[in-house]
Structure formats: C-alpha cells, structure tokens
Amino acid sequence: MDGPLVRCDNVIKIHKQGALEAVALQGVDLEVRPGEFVVIVGRSGSGKSSLLHILGGMERPSAGRVVVAGTDLTSAIGADIRHHFRRNVGFVWQEFTRNLVPYLKAVQNIELPMLLAGVAGERRRRRARALLEVTGLQNRAYSRVNVLSGGEQQRLALCVALSLGPRLLLADEPTGELDTQRSLQVYELLRRLCSEGGLTVVAVTHDVALARRADRVFHLQDGKFRLDRRVRVKRVVDIGADGGVHLPPELLAEAMMTDRANAQVVEEGILLHRDAGSG
C-alpha cells in the first residue's frame, strides 16, 4: 500500500476510574510504513500498552485520529473493528498465555484461529508447520501447552499471533520470558519477517539493548514521545579482522561526527560520543 500502514495524529487517551482521570497518552504522533520493525520503550505506566491496544482496535482514543491498514479506528464500530483485529492484526500479549488454549497441543493452538476463519485443512497444517519450524518448536508440535517451558509457550504465542498472516504484529514484551540468546533469535526472526515477508511490527519492551535491533526506536515517557532521544538504526556495519569499523558517511553526518570520536564500553556494546575537540 502507498503511505504508512499505521498513522496516529495527536492521539490522547484518558482512563477514567470513577471520579478520577489518568492520562495515558498526551498527543502522540506516529507513522509506521509497511515492512518496518518499530519498537517503543518506556517504563511501566508510560502509556506503551495503551497505545498497542488502540492500534489493535481494543480501545478507542479519547481524542485524535488513528488509521491502521486503511481502517479509521477513531470512528470504526462493530464488524469493522472485529475484521481489523482478526485480519489485519496479530497480537502477542504481555500475559502471553492469553494467546494459548492450555488443553490443546501446540500445533492445534496455531491451527485454531485458521480453523475459525475457515482456512482449509492442508493449508492450516502447512502454515502451522512453517511457523513451528521458524520458531524452533518443530519437535514440540504435539506437546500440550502445560508441558512446555515458559520460553516455549511464549514462542508458541508468537506462532498463534502470526497464524492468519496479519499485516501488523503488535507485541507487548515479546521476549519477556526468554533468555538473551533466545530473545535475540526472536528479534532476528521478526526482522526477517519484516524484510522478507512484508510483516510490519510494533513492539514494546523494557530492554533497550534488544530494541536497538529494530529499524526505529521511540522512547515513550509520561504519555509522550521523547523526540530528542529517538534512536534511528540505519544499518549493520562490518568489523574488519584488524578491528576496524567503517561507518557510512550519512550515519556520521546524522550523529554530527567528523574525524574523531570517544569510544566507551557499555553493557550493550560500544558507545561512540562526539569528540568535543574534533573538527
């Protein structure tokens, strides 16, 4: 499609509890193009989950406009909302077991949304097998959910969310129960689905190190994007045998770096700072 798959214009969300009002989102603007992998980071209570729920059509904004996959979620009702959630969107909840039926086998969980949507049997089985393989669960296809580990259940929840081939995947802490190695594998899988399969991903996480593997990272604080801290990941660069790293000129220009930089080892890797004496 032409233009963004996701567009939010001045979105405001106010939660009411009796006489009390809590502002979750304060004038959020966001555009996500087809095939992008976007991550939103922020502390608990910053508004991340509220934004995902609005994009999924589960909550309506208090003000502003939201258009996802051609559906205006600000005014959509009834059948339009149900169609949007079932066909356009896959959702991985932070409580990922909400994606799963505990007494069914893994492959049956993946096939269930397709069965309810009227997908033919052989097509369901092929899709389920492919998803089990790419998430490393092919040997657990006929295991019941209650015998899977937490990490296996989380990967199965991702399979269920992708079963109908949604255009947009919304993921709330998609690697919360996984160790670092498996988390990286899931993020690389999502990147591959974006670049090769045309999937668009909007995920929220607390893990900034993992988030930086996305195409763009937005920092949400007190219901607002901190534009001065937005991270743009342009590309992967190669490290030579001698340890030399050659950064693309446009990346250096955006960071306002010239011929020198200060390097610092941090938890996520190596952080480069502008050298005040350079230039």
Image: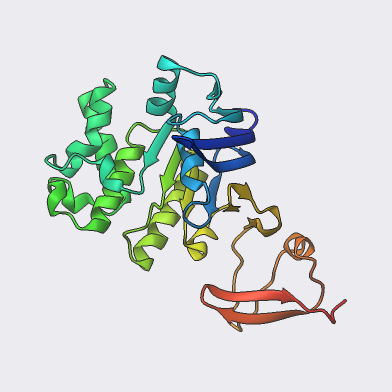
Location of residue 61 (image quadrant): top right
Front-most of residues 136 and 225: 225
The residue lying furthest to the bottom in this view is: 242
Query: Residue drawn 49% across and 43% down?
Result: 201
Q: Is residue 159 left or right of residue 84?
A: left
The residue lying furthest to the front in this view is: 19
Front-most of residues 20 and 151: 20
Please state, as top left, top right, bottom left or bottom right, where the N terminus lies in the image.
Answer: top right
In the depicted structure, whether residue 216 falls above or below residue 24: below
Query: Residue drawn 43% across and 32% down?
Result: 89
Q: Is residue 33 left or right of residue 122?
A: right
- Residue 71, given in percent of the width and then of the height, sits at 53, 22
- Residue 59, given in percent of the width and then of the height, sits at 46, 31
- Residue 169, given in percent of the width and then of the height, sits at 44, 40
- Res 123 seen here: no
The residue lying furthest to the right in this view is: 279
- Residue 190, given in percent of the width and then of the height, sits at 44, 49
Q: Is residue 257 left or right of residue 175?
A: right
In the depicted structure, whether residue 119 falls above or below residue 191: above
